[in-house]
Amino acid sequence: PLDDIVKIWKRVYDMYGESHIMMTGGEPSLYPNFIEMVDELSKFHTVKVTSQLSGDFYTFAKKINPERVVLDMNFHPFEAKLEPFIRKVLTLKKAGFSGGVCYLAYPPQMDKMKYYEEKFRENDIGFALAAYWGKYNGVTYPDGYTEEERELIAPYIGDIDRIKYHLEGVKTMGKLCRAGYCYASVKGDGTVTRCGPLSHKPIGNLFDDDFKLHDEPMPCEAEVCPCDEYVWLVENKKD
């Protein structure tokens, strides 16, 4: 229930102060009471929503405070039509929301990347890429990208750390990390893990009255860090 969700995040605020909630995985905009939930949570935490814009983002644009909420908008051409997607993005931009469009460097849609980039840039919409982590036609990615594909993808990925961990898949096991200390991954049922790659190793449940994060950074227990959670490695801490 929405009231329970708001209650536990108020408790997080009381324990740790204002946090940054990143709603991702599946399609957040299809969650029950999505707009109401974002509205309530953004009153005491900032919020980032990663979305394919499947839900009612016209109402979202009217009701949600863009100073408290940012969007990471993902376009998947096999699942969404371009023109309606662009209309939603432009509506959100007009309402004051920041954030560009992310396009997955999935092998069967790589050949259309430049076409879609041009369409978004024609509408003054930022365009970035995310590397594909998974198998396609028996090939494991991102290791399976050719050198030519890597050179094509790299400029759209971001800074050198993102290229290093997200595209090249540099190992993180054993590196001291703040995940679980000042960052955590929370599932829909409240299960908390240090990060996404450690989703099989819970450290507690947000609904438990005695839940708390680790007292200090601990060594990374994952081989690789496919998303952006590498930013919590102590060596990447920015003062």
Image (cartoon, helix red, strand yellow):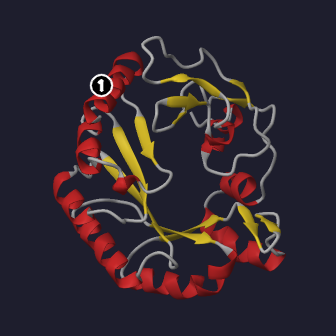
Residue at point 16%, 58% (across, down): 62
Tell me: 5 left or right of 147.
left
Which secondary structure, mark 1? helix
Name the image quarter holding residue 209.
top left
Tell me: 104 left or right of 220.
left
Name the image quarter holding residue 208.
top left
Observer-nearest of 113 and 80: 80
Residue at point 71%, 35% (across, down): 235
Is 239 placed above or below 88 here? Answer: above
- Residue 30 x, y percent position in the rendering: 35, 56
- Residue 236 x, y percent position in the rendering: 66, 39
Tell me: 166 left or right of 171.
left
Is 65 placed above or below 183 here? Answer: below
Is 148 placed above or below 38 here? Answer: below
Q: Quadrant of the N terminus?
A: top left
Q: Give the total number of marks visible in the rendering.
A: 1
Name the image quarter holding residue 238.
top right
- Residue 159 x, y percent position in the rendering: 63, 57
The residue identified by callout 1 is 7
Give the crowd class for mark 1: few <14, some 14-19, many >=20 residues within 10 Å: few
Residue at point 67%, 30% (across, down): 201
Tell me: 97 left or right of 173.
left
- Residue 203 x, y percent position in the rendering: 60, 23
Pick out the residue farthest to the top: 210
Observer-nearest of 20 and 155: 20
Pick out the residue farthest to the left: 62
Q: Quadrant of the C terminus?
A: top right
Residue type at tag 1: Lys
